[in-house]
Amino acid sequence: MSSPAKLRPATAPVVFTGNFLSDGRVAWLAGDGTWSPRIAEARVFPAEAAARVPQDPRVVGPYAVEVDLAAGLPTPRRFRERLRVTGPSVVAEPALRLALAS
Amino acid sequence: MPLLENGGLVADPWVAVAPDAPIPDAPAIIGHDRALAEAEALAGRNTPLGVTLPNDVPPETLLPILDRLSLVVLDLPKFRDGRAFTQARTLRERHGFRGEIRAAGHVIPDQYAALLRCGVTTVAVPEGTDPTVWDAARRVVSIAYQPRLDPTAPLAGLRRRLELA
Amino acid sequence: MNAVTPVGAPRHPEHARLYRYDAIDRAFLQERIAEFRGQVQRRIDGALTEDEFKPLRLMNGLYLQLHAYMLRVAIPYGLLSSTQMRQLGMIARRWDRGFGHFTTRQNIQFNWTKLEDVCAMLEALADVDMHAIQTSGNCIRNVTTDEYAGAACDEVVDPRIYAEILRQWSTLHPEFTWLPRKFKIAVTGSPQDRVAAQVHDIGVLAKRDAGGAVGFEVWVGGGLGRTPLLGTKIRDWVPEADFLRFMEAVLRVYNALGQRENIYRARIKILVRDMGAEFAGAVEREFAAIPRDPYALDPAIVAAIAAHFAAPPFAALADEPATYVRARRENAEFAAWTRNALRPHRAPGYASVTISLKPIGGIPGDASADQMEALADLAERYSFGEIRVTHSQNLVLAHVRQEDLFTLWQALGPLGLATPNIGLVSDIIACPGMDYCALATARSIPVAQRISERFARLDRQLEIGELNLNISGCINACGHHHVGHIGILGVDKRGEEVYQITLGGNQGNDASIGELIGPAFSYDAVVDAVETLLRTYVDRRDPGERFVDTYRRLGAVPFREALYAPA
């Protein structure tokens, strides 16, 4: 599972995240109760809601992530979670490496 | 609790006896410590006796009474805790125990084949268990790469064909 | 019995030496895939919880990482045929993003796997006699060995034979599949330990007695991770016939007595440390109690497996052919590459070639599908169709004619595979770190990239000389930082990545665990810190000393002063 090892009570607003069972891709709990691959669609909850993690059979290991809000859009506070939003910080795909090199 | 044997559900004739309750004149399961403590009194008993063996107790502990036991119940508190596999194999291979070895606790079908190969004969399964899932799980892999004690004709090299009852 | 469709044999090159599956092994793989397909279906149906499914998928190599599932494919003791390498390239292209990552356990990982694709990937692997069995989980993992097996001049016993016997014996072992924790075995057959035997759960040193009979020295309880420990020798000589019986005894003592409550105390190294000499006593009692004959390793079985690893038909050649000598003289770049990439070979006129997967600024251990396919072709042309994966995340063509080295090198260059840095500062071992791994606490790859870019110039790397620089992105130490001459460990400090540096680690016969030099460095400062350490070493070294030798002679003080001196 991908939740961070250390858990302390949340002090900032949170969004809920996990990974889709079917393909392992990152999932965010959206406003309509479904899970979305896009954090922009994530519903933001007050810090007190962090402990009540919603469960869904299609999502593995859901947990709460503390976020800052800029223009209404959530950005995770932890670097690890920001990496889950952006993907790896390094370029491994050969096609992309070639494109960057040229 | 339903009991699984040879891939199907069977009746369980055994009763589990509380530590301070009298032992009935029926197939009875008691704690291993009680069986050892009351070994003399139990010596004259003619009905089958079974014990539970916690997974941190070495099977050697049972040696003084092993030949009078018809059943040893091994406990898997979590299915990931594999000590019962070693206990079962030790009872069978080292100590020649020929009675029933039962796995109880949290066991999943995917462990069934390995438990059988270690000498377990029955599994206590939850109510509502579909035995066909367990039977399929024990049949899906038919080849083993490990030797075993009974002489079996190896296929070739380290491999042999698994036999199922 | 399960009806299994017979599967055709893959066409491995005639002289590639690997364990060749027969119909029984192939039937087994098909059954194992059928089992996993059923498990995946039960998980999707909800019959298996994630808690129950997780160890089952792990034992089929499937992790859930930060961005996707990751499939870790077993490369038994690092040995691949060109047919298998080509298939890995195909898998990378079809189900991943066109690349794979070779690991320190001589395996390969695909980072962008989907659960719904896994069984198809396993089928594709089975087509070339490969699988992902027991590449994770609390079971006996892929056995590793010397990447120069069958080629090394100092080899006494061919370790591949016993690594393969262990692979088979440990495959779905009914008793040892639910161990307290993972279990790693390395086998070497040379007096010069190239497999880091002392940092494995079991390190096996195969050797011969005066009469030539094979036996094994057994080390137990080494390991890295949170509590790095060197192994303890518990037997100087286990006769060949008793090999598996002794292994069973060690594993049984561990399975019965190993800690299960605290994951950080569950490895066998903690049991060995806590029991002291009593551990060896317990193993010996267990060993004596296991019936000898049923578990004896039959010499006929050993001979049958040894036949898979017979020497390929080496040509009668002489060392240093004129064409090779001339090419080296006329081409300085080629000469520089040969200095580090080559190892002497037991057959005259041959050499073992290490191919760097550490291009400057690249990702250590990564190879593209194109590279894998091209390497398969080169292996067929120049090395009997065999490729080995090293625990330092490079590849080896073990049997190359010296007269072919120049053309091989010319072919490697355009593929980005001729970086002349084997054993140098930019030949960095690094785990995937937080860019991919769910357990990581900091990134590893970009630190490796920045260090290799800082020391990009070959003359600078050569001036520094032999150096092991290892980077882990968390305390689990997949990047082996404890045994790097310089080790870097990335940790999380209040949401920020910081990097601790350890010095003086080493693997091999004089293995040692590195010592923490002082407070951690920021992501930005860690490359400067490495440069400071290397400058200090170059200034203070005696002629011929490696970094680790200088460190052992001088101790930590000069390095610490250089690192933490007020500016």
Image (cartoon, coloured by chain):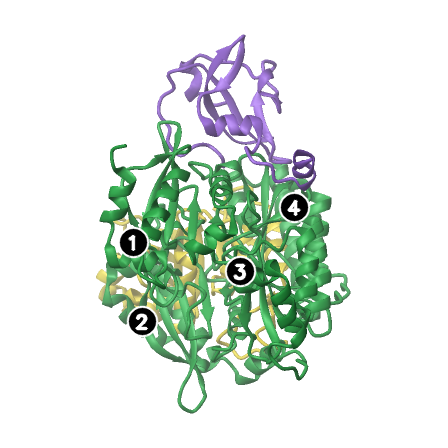
Chain colours: A purple, B yellow, C green
Q: Circle 1 sits on which residue? A: C540
Whether labels 1 and 2 share one chain: yes
**Amino acid on which disc 2 is placed:** Ile
Q: Looking at the image, can residue B31 be seen?
A: no
Q: Nearer the viewer, residue C367 or B31?
A: C367
- Tell me the subunit letter for badge 1: C
The residue tagged 4 is C99
Q: Which of labels 1 and 4 is toward the front?
A: 1
Q: Chain of mark 2?
A: C
Q: Is residue C444 above or below residue B28?
A: above
Q: Quick check: do tags 1 and 3 share a chain?
A: yes
Task: Tell me what residue is drawn at x 58 percent, y 69 percent.
Answer: C352
Label 1 is placed on what type of residue? Answer: Arg
Upstream in sequence: badge 2 or badge 3? 2
Q: How far apart are the two marked residues, 3 and 4, measured between alpha carbons?
A: 18 Å
Q: Amino acid at mark 4?
A: Phe
The quarter of the displayed image where residue C354 is located: bottom right
Q: How busy is the neighbourhood of tag 1: few (under 14 within 10 Å), some, or many (20 plus)? A: some
Q: Closer to the N terminus: mark 1 or mark 2?
A: 2
Which of labels 1 and 2 is toward the front? 1
Q: Position of residue C312 (x, y in %)?
A: 66, 78
For the residue labelled by badge 4, is the local secondary structure a helix, a strand or a loop? strand
Which secondary structure, mark 3? loop
Q: Nearer the viewer, mark 2 or mark 3?
A: 3
Task: Determine whether label 1 and label 2 are within 8 Å by CB.
Answer: no
Residue beneath disc 2: C234
* Chain at numbered mark 4: C
Residue C302 found in image quarter = bottom right
The residue carrying mark 3 is C390
C463 vs C148, left or right, is left
